[in-house]
Image (cartoon, rainbow, N blue to C red):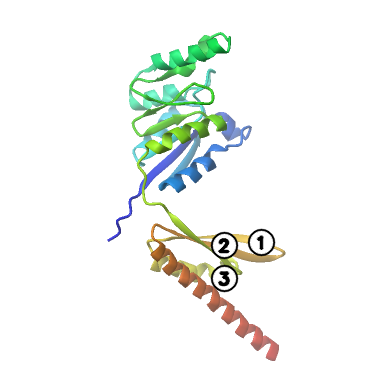
Amino acid sequence: MSQDIVVTAAMLAIGDELLSGRTKDKNIGHLADLLTLSGIDLKEVRIVADDEEAIVEALNALRGKYDYVFTSGGIGPTHDDITADAISKAFGVPCEYDEVAMTLLAEMYRRREMEFTEARQRMARMPRGAVHIANPVSTAPGFIIGNVHVMAGVPQVFQAMVDNVLPTLRTGTPVLSLAIACPYGEGEIGTPLTAIQKAHPETSIGSYPRYVGQKFSTEIVVRGRSQAVIDAAGAEVREMIDAIRQRKDIAENHSAEA
């Protein structure tokens, strides 16, 4: 019986600018890379507008389905930064000015000889009972409530917050992978590859087509949590490629003889 430990996660990226294309997201790929290395499976990503009801609906769906949820965006000082309010509503708690966050921000703006305006104070608001995520870049903290980790949308700040969060998370058995170059297109390998996947249910086999110089080829990637099951599936994939090659060689020989 497999003793693999599976830990799952989802990401909720928040912001009108992401949906309009004005801002190109850099946080999803970064988080996916780090979670994979940590043995946490990123199962779903959603992008929603700066709309409270949309954020609440998406968050409640995700936090009940996965072990962890990570959000990005919407915790800044402007009127459309409504993530803290929406998270509070989703959990049914007040959104309040956090005393420690207020002190951190006030001291930071004093050092910079800048006014700690009402807009800047908004960055100290978070759901009652939330725990800080340290922000070594620009001071304003993210926060954790339940299984939800709320972080900034600015990539440099998001990445710094993720670095602080990852060591605190429960992790699972890492996913291993094996990449196999296949000189044939998906149309030729689709049926036998499906059979191999069915024969090796503990693996996930992906095929990624390429088109170079008017010729199709495919990279086949076998993923799993055990090197033994990956190697077994990989061996069958290589046998499949050899069988297709032999069949083509026979067909070409017959054509040449005709």
Residue corresponding to mark 1: 211
Q: Looking at the rendered structure, which numbered label has been put on residue 20? A: none
**Callout 3: 10 Å neighbours few (<14), some, many (20+)?**
few
Q: Could one spot residue 27 in this view of the protein?
A: yes
**Real-space Cα separation, disc 3 to disc 2, in angstroms:** 13 Å
Q: Looking at the rendered structure, which numbered label has been put on residue 188? A: 3
Residue corresponding to mark 2: 219
User: What amino acid type is highlighted by mark number 1?
Assistant: Tyr
Q: Earlier in the sequence, mark 3 or mark 2?
A: 3
Residue 49 x, y percent position in the rendering: 52, 30
Q: Could one spot residue 14 in this view of the protein?
A: no
Q: Foreground residue, 206 or 194?
A: 206
| Residue at the bottom extreme, as displayed | 257
Q: Which is in the foreground here, disc 3 or disc 2?
A: 2
Q: Secondary structure at mark 3?
A: helix
Q: Which is in the foreground here, disc 3 or disc 1?
A: 1
Snapshot quadrant of residue 219: bottom right
Residue 236 x, y percent position in the rendering: 46, 72
**Real-space Cα separation, disc 1 to disc 2, in angstroms:** 11 Å
